[in-house]
Image (cartoon, helix red, strand yellow):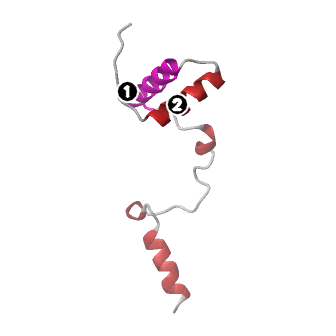
Amino acid sequence: MATTAIRLNKELVDKAQAYATAEGKSLSSIIEDFLSRLTSSREETEEIPDIVLSLLGAGAPVDDDDINGRKAYYGHLEQKHQ
């Protein structure tokens, strides 16, 4: 196994080491897991969680050119303040 030196804030490393000890893991294994997940998430597309999928269609449909709802909101304000 090859090792690489990196520079990190000492306070951050101390906190991370305390966390690793409390979890019964080594700090190196936690960092390896994190970096592995970080790089694999770019390679693979993650599935949308079921809870999010269950919300699809829950709201009123919006126009394709009004994805953030600003036009609808401003239209509502115009009607309200006529």
- Prevalent SS, magenta region: helix
What residue occupies the far top of the structure in this picture? 1
Residue 33 relative to residue 50: left or right:
left
Q: Which residue is mark 1?
A: 43
Image x and y of residue 57, in percent: 58, 53
Image x and y of residue 78, in percent: 48, 85
Q: Which residue is mark 2?
A: 14
Q: How many marks?
A: 2
Structural crowding at the residue carrying mark 2, measured as other residues with C-alpha within 10 Å and reported as few (<14), some (14–19) or many (≥20) = few
Front position in the image: 8 or 53: 8
Name the amino acid, label 1: Glu
Depicted 52 relative to depicted 59: above or below? above
Please report the bounds of the magenta region as a residue range: 27-45
Magenta span has 76? no
Q: Residue at x 62, y 55 (%)?
A: 58
Quarter of the N terminus within the rendering: top left
Q: Residue at x 53, y 90 (%)?
A: 81
Name the amino acid, label 2: Asp
Q: Are marks 2 and 1 in contact (CB under 8 Å)?
A: no
Q: Residue at x 60, y 29 (%)?
A: 19
Observer-side mark, 2 or 1, equals 2
What residue occupies the far bottom of the structure in this picture? 82
Residue 8 relative to residue 25: left or right:
left
Q: Earlier in the sequence, mark 2 or mark 1?
A: 2
Image x and y of residue 70, in percent: 44, 70
Structural crowding at the residue carrying mark 1, measured as other residues with C-alpha within 10 Å and reported as few (<14), some (14–19) or many (≥20) = few
Depicted 63 relative to depicted 71: above or below? above
